[in-house]
């Protein structure tokens, strides 16, 4: 009998559990995470307008684990003993026959003054605190921005920032107080959102101009100060700052003995196996995968990689070689609270469609996605 250990309980981890059971695996699955829960980050954009509360986004996985025969270990991963096939955790060692790393990445928190900003998509507490401050302000300057990992171009998240930016503009207009606020967008990228394609960049920047949002692009971040954003090219007011730093791998990656990319992620093959390892796979934000420069880090890609990793683990158990790969594609809806733009890109095509129904489609997808886990 084989014991598969999964590190993490996010999108990739939960998808892997479903894929393993769907494809006939009936042996042991052990999942390690601090809490038995899945948090739905994409809908944090609805916190400020009251469209989502914490209980909507935090899904208890106890029932899901029971239905799928998963043994949950409430612990944090601290390292890896690959020679003895054991995962080091805060509750001791866990032996495995096959390991899937799906514990996500983490934000780079080196920028001076970062504590003065709210990090979008860092969780409920950060976003709710930002939303409460926004709703308590009568006027001021609001700054929204993102940065990347200079050693890993794909390790950035710009989409959520665009949603928070446009959604805040919509909310303030709905409340009749937009004229009392200045909105700023900033990013060190000269073409922010370039992974979605040049036309998408033009449309996004054009939408900012149409909404009278000041654009600060192409200048390296230097620091945050109280009420101010400072870059190497300029500085501007930011009474309330929402920011997404670049990403890197989990904090225990350096204690794993596994191959790491220049950006600090687990280096992966096209089959989602950690490069140079035996019986160790990775899916989602923890990994650095081959593919085009525009490859995204998003929940959809984490799901595709998790399915690939699960199928290749089953191949290994059956004595076959890895032969499953994943499709690299970017698909997202940039929601502005009253309409949405669906963006799609793969290696053959890319397009964007803006329409009001996409705003409702995003909510429908959330319901559909979370239904199996509730």
Image: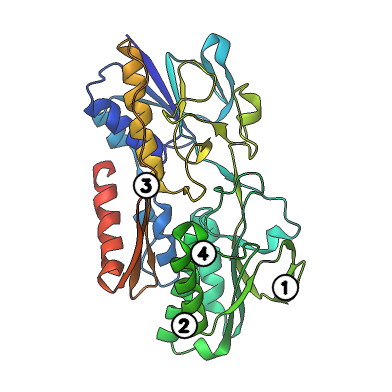
Give the number of the disc on residue 161.
Answer: 4
Image quadrant where residue 114 sits: bottom right
**Residue labelled with disc 1:** 228
In 3D space, how far apart are the residues under numbered discs 4 and 2 (Cα atoms)?
Answer: 16 Å
Q: Is residue 79 left or right of residue 95?
A: right
| Vertical relation: 271 (above or below) 339 | above
Q: Residues within 10 Å of mark 3 (few under 14, many from 20)?
A: some
Q: Are marks 1 and 3 in contact (CB under 8 Å)?
A: no
What x and y, as percent, mark residue 47?
A: 43, 66
Give the number of the disc on residue 172.
Answer: 2
| Vertical relation: 127 (above or below) 105 | below
In 3D space, how far apart are the residues under numbered discs 1 and 3 (Cα atoms)?
Answer: 35 Å
Image quadrant where residue 358 sits: bottom left
What x and y, as percent, mark residue 97?
A: 42, 13
Q: Nearer the viewer, residue 329 or 74?
A: 329
Q: Is residue 243 left or right of residue 362?
A: right
């Amino acid at each position: 009998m084989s014991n598969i250990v999964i590190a993490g309980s996010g999108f990739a981890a939960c998808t892997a559990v479903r894929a393993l059971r769907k494809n006939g695996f009936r042996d042991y699955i052990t999942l390690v995470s601090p809490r038995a829960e899945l948090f739905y980050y994409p809908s944090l954009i609805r916190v400020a307008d009251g469209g989502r509360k914490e209980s909507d986004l935090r899904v208890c996985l106890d029932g899901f684990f029971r239905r799928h025969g998963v043994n949950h270990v409430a612990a944090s991963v601290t390292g890896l003993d690959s020679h003895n096939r054991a995962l080091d955790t805060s509750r001791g060692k866990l032996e495995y026959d096959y390991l899937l790393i799906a514990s996500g990445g983490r934000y780079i928190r080196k920028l001076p003054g970062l504590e003065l900003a709210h990090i979008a998509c860092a969780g409920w507490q950060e976003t709710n605190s930002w939303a409460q401050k926004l709703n308590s302000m009568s006027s001021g300057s609001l700054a929204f921005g993102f940065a990347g990992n200079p050693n890993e171009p794909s390790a950035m998240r710009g989409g959520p920032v665009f949603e928070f930016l446009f959604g805040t503009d919509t909310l303030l207009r709905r409340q009749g107080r937009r004229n009392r606020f200045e909105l700023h967008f900033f990013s060190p990228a000269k073409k922010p959102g370039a992974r979605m394609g040049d036309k998408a960049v033009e449309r996004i920047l054009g939408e900012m101009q149409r909404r009278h949002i000041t654009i600060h692009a192409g200048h390296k971040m230097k620091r945050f100060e109280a009420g101010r954003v400072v870059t190497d090219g300029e500085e501007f007011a930011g009474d309330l700052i929402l920011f997404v730093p670049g990403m890197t791998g989990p904090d225990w990656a350096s204690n794993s003995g596994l191959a790491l990319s220049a950006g600090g992620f687990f280096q992966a093959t096209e089959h989602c196996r950690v490069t140079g390892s035996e019986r160790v796979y990775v899916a989602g934000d923890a990994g650095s995968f081959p593919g085009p420069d525009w490859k995204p880090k998003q929940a959809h890609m984490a799901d595709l990689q998790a399915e690939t990793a699960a199928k290749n683990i089953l191949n290994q158990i059956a004595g076959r070689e890895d032969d499953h790969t994943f499709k690299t594609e970017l698909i997202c809806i940039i929601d502005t609270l009253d309409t949405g733009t669906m963006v799609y890109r793969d290696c053959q095509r890319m397009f964007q469609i803006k329409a009001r129904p996409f705003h409702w489609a995003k909510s429908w997808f959330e319901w559909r996605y979370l239904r199996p886990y509730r």
